[in-house]
């Protein structure tokens, strides 16, 4: 007798759960990659349900994830997009849009840290503004007040603090400067989802906050991102810009249609726009990933505490970062800076860790002012950027993901101790 669609769906769910129970998604033995798959049968089955329903483009699962995400971070509004990079682009595009009060105009300057990922910077260029690369703190890897003050000019209209590798900028200092100078603030929080400062989730201090759900980030929708804001009007503009400039997903679409009765509201365009929509499959992932955020971040903090303690005797050779004032760090990764007087180089440390199966990377893009792409981009550099250059030359990080076991955490600690002990006694 033929089975019903519901019976088949339940059998698919059962088989997916059985597949994951076999542990086939675990990293290869002996390898500690920067990230490991941090999703399970719940995300896969929710996605399968979307595929079976045929409602796969942006729809109710995305909208429900937006609502839950806004509540989790304490934002009034959240708008999901297809990547964290797109979130940055939409936040800048909203500030540069004529519909926004006091728009960011071509030639205006936006202060951004020199140590960040490239897509913190390219959206500034893409909306016609000029990125100003400012130095960062060696203690936190983030912009500080002194760096921002040094980068200011009469053309400065916005500052884009980047909460790097789970740490946070001092947002009280950023807001004080912004208020004094009349600057917009866009928080790039793509690497710091769940980080808190003074009891408030970072990404919710400025005019806009952006987040990423890329595969290696705090939670994942495979690809995906979010823009948050406390201003419903800004959120409405972002929703319109997200999808072609039309009104389909605008909360005020009835009012907009009423103002343009001569145009079919199904194809009513009220602004310019992009196509940066996520899929409902990404929304399906997000619904199950969001409850995992706090447990994942607890593991990240636990790991970091172990490594900070074990590396403390070698602080003359290896600099570890510290949280900014009032910050509850989420340790997206674990960065290290080899001190100039250390009896080994960054390259030697990296090669040793890699030889033991522990993946490493430079600290994001290093000093962006040294990247060849900037030969083709109008920009300004605020000073010599000595800290950014030191990070580029002597910095690295290794992975710290939310499903790293205590055994693997200990393995990393012992590997670091093994390498350091070869070069002398602790504190030498």
Image: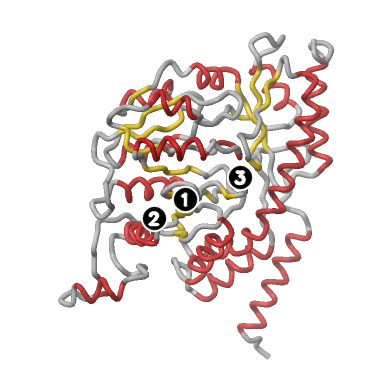
Which one is in front, 287 or 57?
287
Residue furthest to the bottom: 1
Left or right side of 76 for 347: right
**Rounded to the nearest whole Å, what is the CA distance between mark 1 and mark 3?**
28 Å
Which one is in front, 394 or 253?
253
State which tag comes first along the sequence, 3 or 2. Answer: 3
Residue 231: x and y in percent read: 40, 58
**Rounded to the nearest whole Å, what is the CA distance between mark 1 and mark 2?**
8 Å
State which tag comes first along the sequence, 1 or 3. Answer: 1
In the structure shown, which secondary structural element does the residue marked by tag 3 occupy? loop
In the structure shown, which secondary structural element does the residue marked by tag 1 occupy? loop
In the structure shown, which secondary structural element does the residue marked by tag 2 occupy? loop
From the image, state whether disc 1 or disc 3 is nearer to you: 3
Residue 79: x and y in percent read: 44, 59
- In the rendered structure, find residue 276 and report the number of the disc placed on it: 2
**Rounded to the nearest whole Å, what is the CA distance between mark 3 and mark 2?**
33 Å
Tag 1–tag 3 contact (CB < 8 Å): no
Residue 156: x and y in percent read: 32, 33
Residue 306: x and y in percent read: 79, 35
Q: Going 61% across and 45% down the picture, which residue do you hit?
A: 198
Q: Going 54% across and 36% down the picture, which residue do you hit?
A: 170
| Mark 3, residue position | 198
| Mark 1, residue position | 83
Number of residues whose C-alpha sits closer than 10 Å to that of mark 3, classed few (under 14), some (14–19) or many (20 or more)? few
């Amino acid at each position: 007798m033929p089975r019903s669609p519901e019976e088949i769906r339940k059998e698919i769910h059962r088989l997916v759960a059985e597949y994951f129970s076999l542990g086939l998604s675990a990293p290869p033995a002996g390898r500690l990659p920067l990230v490991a798959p941090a999703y399970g049968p719940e995300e896969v089955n929710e996605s399968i349900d979307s595929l079976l329903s045929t409602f796969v483009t942006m729809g109710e699962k995305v909208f429900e994830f937006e609502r839950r995400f806004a509540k989790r971070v304490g934002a009034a509004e959240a708008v999901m997009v297809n990547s964290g990079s797109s979130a940055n682009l939409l936040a800048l595009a909203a500030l540069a849009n004529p519909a926004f009060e006091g728009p960011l105009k071509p030639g205006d300057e936006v202060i951004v840290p020199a140590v960040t990922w490239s897509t913190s910077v390219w959206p500034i260029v893409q909306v016609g503004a000029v990125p100003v690369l400012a130095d960062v703190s060696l203690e936190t890897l983030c912009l500080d007040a002194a760096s921002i003050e040094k980068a200011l000019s009469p053309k400065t209209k916005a500052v884009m603090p980047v909460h790097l590798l789970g740490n946070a900028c001092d947002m009280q200092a950023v807001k004080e400067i912004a208020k004094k100078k009349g600057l917009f603030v866009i928080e790039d929080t793509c690497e710091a989802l769940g980080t808190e400062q003074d009891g408030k989730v970072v990404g919710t201090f400025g005019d806009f906050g952006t987040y990423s759900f890329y595969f290696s980030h705090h939670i994942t929708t495979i690809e995906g991102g979010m823009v948050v804001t406390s201003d419903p009007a800004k959120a409405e503009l972002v929703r319109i810009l997200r999808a072609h400039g039309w009104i389909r997903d605008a909360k005020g679409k009835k009012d907009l249609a009423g103002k343009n009765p001569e145009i079919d509201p199904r194809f009513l365009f009220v602004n310019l726009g992009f196509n940066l929509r996520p899929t409902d499959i990404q929304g399906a992932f997000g619904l199950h990933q969001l409850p995992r955020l706090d447990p994942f971040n607890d593991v990240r903090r636990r790991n970091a505490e172990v490594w900070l303690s074990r590396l403390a005797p070698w602080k003359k050779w290896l600099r570890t970062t510290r949280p900014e004032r009032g910050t509850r760090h989420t340790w997206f990764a674990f960065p290290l800076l080899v001190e100039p007087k250390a009896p080994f180089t960054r390259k030697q440390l990296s090669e040793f860790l890699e030889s033991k199966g522990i993946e490493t990377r430079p600290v994001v893009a290093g000093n962006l002012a040294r990247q060849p792409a900037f030969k083709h981009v109008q920009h300004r550099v605020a000073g010599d950027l000595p800290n950014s250059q030191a990070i580029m030359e002597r910095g690295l990080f290794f992975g710290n993901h939310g499903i790293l076991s205590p055994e693997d955490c200990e393995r990393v600690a012992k590997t670091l101790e093994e390498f350091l002990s070869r070069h002398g006694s602790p504190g030498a």
